Image (spheres, rainbow, N blue to C red):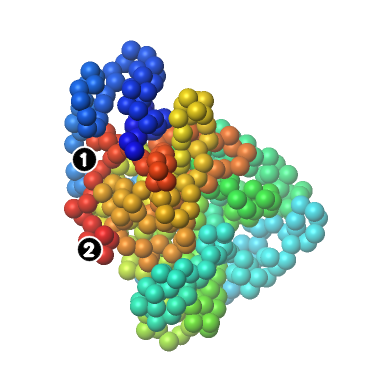
Amino acid sequence: MKAFAVMDRQGDMVAVFDSVGAAIETAKEEAAGAPVYFDGPGEDMGIEEPPPVEMALAANAGAARAAAKAMSACQLKAYDGVRDFEEIMEMDEDEAWERLRSYFPTRRASGRRLKAYDDAPTMAGNLLGQNYKTEKKTPRDVKRLVRERTGRSEATVMGLSLLPHTQVFNTRAAGGADVQDILSVARKRYGLSVIETPRANVCVRSTKECRASCLVFSGRNLADDYNTMKKYSLMQALYGDTEAFIRMLGRAIQRHSVGSHNVRKTPLVRLNVFSDIPWELVCPGIFSYFGDPEQKDAKRGYVQFYDYTKVPGRVVPDNYDITFSYAGDEENAVGMDHEVMESGRRVAVVFGLVGSRKEKGLARVAIPTKPPKGPGGFPEKFLGLKVVDGDKSDLRPYDPAPSVVALRWKIPANQGATLVSAGAFVVRGALVEGQFICAETPIRTRDYAAFADEESE
């Protein structure tokens, strides 16, 4: 069976048909007099072939400067000496707690007293957390890799969930008005004594489209306003007293490390669950402190850090694994060239399904369904790279690199997310004979096959 996709000028799939005639007819209707291009085998269709587009060069100064710009945008003080973190860790825990306690809530919306931040041990125990994905059990095929690298067959993940900046002070951002509503009653409802919203940007290369689909407004994150309140509190504590926060963060990582090693599991930490802070520039000592695989002191036991990022050109320690996030715009694509071709990193791509315009009405405003699980749920290759199912687990350091980490679009509840708001951030495809297919044209995609090693294949 052949399938013919109609795409808009940005390269987004609008509809799919089983005949080229129906596809061309729809394309001409949509174009309203603008040129229509045909890219594919077959006889002359009486329309133009697409103009050739060359891949951007990977060696670009923009990617090299991007990490420094991200550091400048996030406006955090840099504790950039290796000894800095060790000196911070000498601070008394109770002092750090005393300096931070006013930034956190003291009760639930029901009026019940909240004990999560009552003292230093409980605050450290609640600084990191899990979501539906990071709490998944280690898949069987990943267990083998974990065992080969660490001698242990299980891995456990904890993450730091800061509220993205645009959702805090921009009421026009997706979810921004909802956050402002929560903050307007935070003192009375949650007993928050300090509300100091930083004007910094912790997602410097986020796009309008990815913000509209931000996971901060999906799943459990919307189940209770307290979940948003906690993320806000963590963020304002980080900015309100960075040194004390890093001290408490170090203690939280210690707890996770000791607890994991005690049960023969490998500890992993995500420092940017919803943010994109270049932690290797903010506090590089945190990675060396937990970076010795031969360390016998459980409080300094080895920890594997990892994150997703849209910032190219980051130079990170060996125990900090980075996966680049696809956004679909040209700036992001140039950064992706650098990350794959120069750094050999993975690329995380979000996929969604669309159907025929004639079958489903206006596909451009229809919410695509998630690609199905199992065989055919994603293309076998994308951007010339092997595709791995990123929803099976969140253990990215054990995925081949370079490769494409495929993620199903998690539609943000109550945000009115559509194909228009998702834009190029979601790669649209269709199921043809049970297989997920998506258009790869010179205008929108790269081919990194030459940069994939045998393991990635």
Q: Image quadrant for the N terminus?
A: top left
4 or 11, which is in the foreground?
4
Q: Is residue 319 visible?
A: yes
The amino acid on which the numbered mark 1 sits, given as a three-letter code, is Ala
The amino acid on which the numbered mark 2 sits, given as a three-letter code, is Glu
Label 1: which secondary element: loop
The image shows residue 13 at horizontal and vertical percentages of 39, 33
Look at the picture and state if 167 lies above or below 252. above
Image quarter of residue 305 = bottom left
Residue that mark 1 sits on: 56
Image quarter of residue 248 = bottom right
Task: Determine whether, in the image, residue 349 is placed left or right of residue 98.
Answer: left
Q: For the point 23% across and 18% down, which residue is it?
A: 46
Q: For the point 56% across and 63% down, which residue is it?
A: 130
What is the spatial separation of the Cα atoms under label 2 and label 1, in whole angstroms?
25 Å
Look at the picture and state if 439 lies above or below 229. above
The image shows residue 41 at horizontal and vertical percentages of 22, 32
377 or 241, which is in the foreground?
377
Task: Determine whether, in the image, residue 432 is placed left or right of residue 411.
Answer: left
Q: Which mark is residue 438?
A: none
Residue that mark 2 sits on: 454
